[in-house]
Structures are given as structure tokens and as C-alpha cells.
Image (spheres, helix red, strand yellow):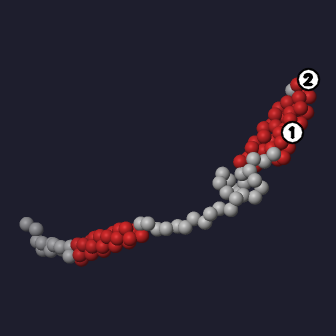
Amino acid sequence: MTGTVLGVGAGVFILALLWVSVLLLCVLLSRVSGAARFSVIFLFFGAVIITSVLLLFPRADEFPAPEVEVKIVDDFFIGRYVLLAFLSAIFLGSLFLVLIHHILEPIYAKPLRSY
């Protein structure tokens, strides 16, 4: 199912955008004085006609074609484990060197008297 967002297709978003814009225009046109006020009726019926056309003439089939199962193959299996072994060896070597430097850090004696 390609082209879906949250499990619904683009048609749902088109219909939602259509009706939100029509309702917004109806609210704006209801405040207008004169003959333009009655254009709300034509706008509403136009939205009903567009919605019915979009619902009655869908582009895609109702039942999608069965998808072929994709076999997942890991081509970089050996390289990944070689890289993991290399990085593990470097990590253990650097950890060993840090601990040796920490343990063998020289401690200098303080002089008893300073002249």
C-alpha cells in the first residue's frame, strides 16, 4: 500500500481539504451583504457534487493486487562482523592503555623542606 499516510490514501486528505475550505468560505460569505450571500448555496452544492464524483469514480481497484514477498538477504554479513571485531579490538586496546596509564601514573614526593 504505497502512498498512504496513517493508513488512508490521498483521497481522504483531498476530501478533508475540500470540505474545510468550503466551510471556511461559507462562513466568510455568510457575513457578506447583498446577492453574494446566496452564493453559499451554490458553493455547498458544488462541494457535494465534487465529493460524490470523487467517491463514485475511484481511480484504484477496491482490492489491491497481492504483493510478491520480498526475500531479505544480508549481503554485508561478513564485512559487518569483521568491522565489529576490528572496532572491538581497538576499543579493548584503548581501554587497556587508559587503565595502564591511570594505574601507572607517577606520584611525585613532596619535599619536606623548601629553602
If you read the primary sequence from the N terminus, does the residue marked by circle 2 or circle 1 appear first?
2
Q: Residue 44 lies in what quarter of the image?
A: top right
Residue 59 locus on image (x, y percent): 75, 47
Mark number for residue 35? 2
Residue 57 locus on image (x, y percent): 81, 45
Residue at (75%, 44%) from the top-left corner? 14
Q: Residue 29 lies in what quarter of the image?
A: top right
Q: Is residue 91 above or below residue 25?
A: below
The kind of residue on which mark 1 rests is: Ile
**How many other residues sit within 10 Å of disc 1, few (<14), some (14-19) or many (≥20)?**
few
Residue at (83%, 39%) from the top-left corner? 50
Left or right, 113 with respect to 100, comes to left
Q: Are marks 2 and 1 in contact (CB under 8 Å)?
A: no
Q: Helix, strand, or loop for circle 1? A: helix
Q: Distance between the residues labelled 2 and 1?
A: 23 Å
Count of numbered marks: 2
The kind of residue on which mark 2 rests is: Ala
Residue at (31%, 70%) from the top-left corner? 86
Nearer to the camera, 99 or 88: 88
Disc 1 marks which residue? 49
Q: In this view, does 79 lie above or below 24?
A: below
Q: Which part of the image, by quadrant, shows the C terminus?
A: bottom left
Nearer to the camera, 56 or 12: 56
Residue at (12%, 72%) from the top-left corner? 111
Nearer to the camera, 109 or 26: 26
Q: Which part of the image, by quadrant, shows the N terminus?
A: bottom right
Nearer to the camera, 83 or 61: 61
Q: In this view, does 103 lie above or below 114?
A: below
